[in-house]
């Protein structure tokens, strides 16, 4: 059906486009393994090829619905996240590793995660990434908040917040639909970390001249907006729990959940008013002759 709508595109052309795209995905996410002597250059070139095809090639919008393409992308998402998780675990498990080498490898993985966050929405496949990220979020923070890493790897910590922001935006603004318990867990995992890191990074910037790692204004606004939107998608009781925790530590100042609190108050009052009106209506019916 799709082919019949594009008279200038032959089935063979689409097949070639699909083969090129699948091959690019495999190299972009290192499914094929390292390709010597090209190293990272081939991976980066493949990612750039996919960016181009998704932005400029009309045929790509057709072939991304193909099962082989979706399978390659799904495998790629798993491969990138699993590789990142494995490398992150090595920070604590293997003390014999060279710290700088491990850090550089992890940052390369995070760069791949960021790339995935940019291309997956164009293929309507962000849900797979979000689900995998949500599944390992607690483990990620369990490692990165270990005392051994308290005063190092600031760049990694900021990058993790940037990736988490993409995930929170996808769920908060409705492009990815998750069950309510998953949304609650995602928010309760990342909200405290963001709230802790913002003043910590700000204080580091004051203490150290030229400290390069911070949450810039755009990132802060994006996270705050995503968190507010996500809170408002939750069941009322979960909203109340999160907002009550925010009020208890409101002196931190970030993120500002005043908008979510006001909406929750309005909805709660409206629900109570409707309940009272409904009960009064039933009472009047019951006593009428």
Image (cartoon, rainbow, N blue to C red):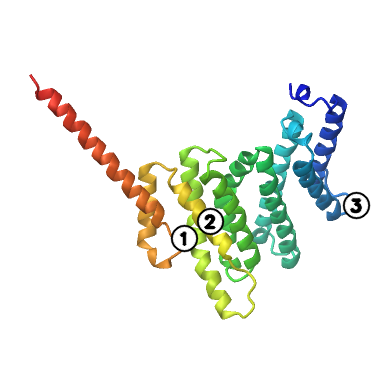
Which badge, 3 or 1, is on the more N-terminal residue? Answer: 3
SS of the residue under disc 1: loop
> How many marks are shown on the rendered structure?
3
SS of the residue under disc 2: helix
The residue to which callout 3 is attached is 36
Query: Please, is residue 74 above or below residue 10 in the view?
Result: below
Q: Point out the image quarter for the C terminus.
A: top left
Residue contact at pointers 3 and 1, CB within 8 angstroms? no
Q: Nearer the viewer, mark 3 or mark 1?
A: 1
Q: Residue at x 53, y 38 (%)?
A: 177
Image coordinates for residue 242, horizontal then vertical, percent = 40, 52
Q: Which mark is residue 255?
A: 1
72 or 94, nearer to the observer = 72
The residue to which callout 2 is attached is 223
Mark 3 burial class by Cα count in 10 Å: few <14, some 14-19, many 20+: few
Q: Residue at x 51, y 59 (%)?
A: 193
């Amino acid at each position: 059906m799709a082919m019949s709508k594009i008279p200038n595109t032959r089935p063979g052309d689409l097949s070639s486009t699909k083969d090129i795209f699948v091959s690019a995905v495999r190299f972009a996410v290192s499914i094929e393994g390292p390709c010597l002597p090209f190293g990272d250059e081939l991976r980066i070139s493949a990612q750039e090829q996919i960016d181009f095809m998704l932005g400029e090639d009309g045929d790509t919008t057709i072939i991304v619905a193909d099962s082989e393409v979706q399978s390659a992308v799904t495998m790629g998402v798993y491969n990138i996240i699993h590789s990142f998780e494995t490398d992150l675990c090595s920070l604590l498990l293997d003390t014999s590793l060279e710290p700088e080498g491990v850090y550089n490898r992890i940052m390369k993985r995070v760069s791949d995660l960021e790339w995935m966050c940019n291309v997956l929405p164009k293929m309507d496949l962000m849900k797979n990434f979000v689900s995998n990220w949500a599944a390992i979020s607690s483990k990620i923070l369990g490692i990165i908040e270990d005392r051994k890493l308290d005063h190092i790897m600031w760049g990694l910590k900021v990058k993790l917040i940037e990736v988490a922001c993409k995930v929170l935006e996808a769920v908060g603004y409705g492009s990815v639909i998750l069950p309510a318990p998953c949304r609650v867990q995602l928010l309760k995992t990342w909200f405290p970390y963001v709230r802790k890191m913002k003043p910590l990074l700000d204080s580091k910037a004051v203490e150290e001249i030229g400290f390069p790692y911070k949450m810039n204004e755009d990132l802060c606004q994006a996270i705050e907006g995503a968190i507010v939107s996500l809170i408002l998608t939750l069941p009322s009781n979960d909203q109340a729990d999160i907002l009550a925790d925010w009020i208890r530590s409101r002196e931190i100042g970030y993120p500002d959940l005043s908008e979510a609190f006001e909406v929750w108050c309005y909805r709660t009052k409206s629900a109570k008013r409707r309940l009272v009106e409904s009960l009064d209506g039933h009472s009047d019916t019951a006593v009428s002759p």
